[in-house]
Image (spheres, rainbow, N blue to C red):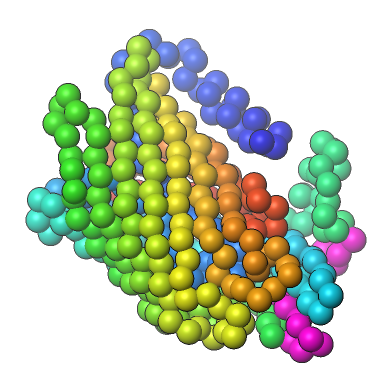
Amino acid sequence: MKFRHFILILMVASLWLPAASEARSLEIKPFYTQNQSPLSHIFGLPPMGEAKVLAPGRKELRFSLDHASNYVKNDAANESILLDGETTRLGLALRYGVRPDFEAGIELPYLIQGGGFLDGFIINYHNAFGFPQGGRDQAPRDRLLYEYRKNNTDLLKVDRSGSGLGDIRLQAAWQLYKGGDRDAFAAALRGSVKLPTGDSDQLFGSGSYDGALWLTAAADFPLAYGSLSLFGAAGMMGMTEGKVIKKQQNNWAGFGSVGIGWSPLSWLALKIQTDAHTPFFRDSDLRELRDNAAQLVVGGTVALTKNMTLDIGVSEDILVSTAPDVVFHLSLNSTF
């Protein structure tokens, strides 16, 4: 775990120390995020989601922001890849409880892509703590260039800043099990369909129809101070032929997540979560395309009102170059 995560944990944990005697705890939910790499976020990879579906007539509105800084440069015998730029993904998601064991929802993403502003900060941060730069300090500052070449042919090149609608996602969930007061275990079967509404030339979408089906589960445990929650998910995703490096695209991918959270107070929860998936591409000697991907998300949830919470998180690649160097995540969630 890098130093910034350790500092983040200490800063957030220090908030509850003076008031640790409070017994109530905040409901713990997984981070609503996924791999934000330019060659991953274009597909219908879903966030883990909750193990409990909404009650009939209950609604949830979520506004999320993921700001990712990417720098990857790698070469093989007949291939080269360069992913240098920043992407902001804004998501507006609505869920609705249709019946006691079923909910439906929709998510509208909007993407802003450019050279960004974090290169100098990340370079100075890495220098201060002795972390490797990976070539970022030798590259032009605040540049946008996503490029993949094979056999001296450009199969991908994006060097123009822009913004636009991403791929819309339709979602549904079925409650498989939900325990009572003395049984804190819950499980749900979730599904989603991603529509090719984003511009694949700008990497705002993949150009494919993607369907995902996954199981998510959680268990809560009371503690002397607050509560502890374990949560996880696993599933499969199928994709039609897209428009991004289409001859090397896989049509199937597996994914999973696991996390743990602790809520010592009625307004605060601390969380750590790992998300992973199998590669979306094949026929490559570059780990950025051929390898499994994994990221670590660390942060927490703060209750702003009785029905409104704010997630704050930082993620990074724990399998090097398979996810962005750093992603700053915010998610404002309201139920009514």
In which quadrant of the rendered image does the N terminus lie? top right
Q: Is residue 309 above or below residue 79?
A: above
What residue sits 81% from the left and 71% below the top?
76
Decide if residue 255 is in sight here. Answer: yes
Give the image quarter of residue 235.
bottom left
Decide if residue 303 is in sight here. Answer: no
Compared across the picture, whether 7 is left or right of 205 comes to right
Magenta residues span 138-154
What residue sits 19% from the left and 48% below the top?
176
Question: In x, y percent, where is residue 200?
Answer: 54, 83
Question: In x, y percent, where is residue 209?
Answer: 40, 79
Depth check, front residue: 272 or 289: 289
Give the image quarter of residue 5.
top right
Compared across the picture, whether 167 is left or right of 68 comes to left
Give the image quarter of residue 139.
bottom right
Q: Does the magenta stretch include residue 321?
A: no
Question: In x, y percent, where is residue 113?
Answer: 62, 71
Q: Residue furthest right?
A: 138
Depth check, front residue: 263 or 121: 263
Q: Does the magenta stretch include residue 146?
A: yes
Q: Is residue 223 above or below residue 139?
A: above
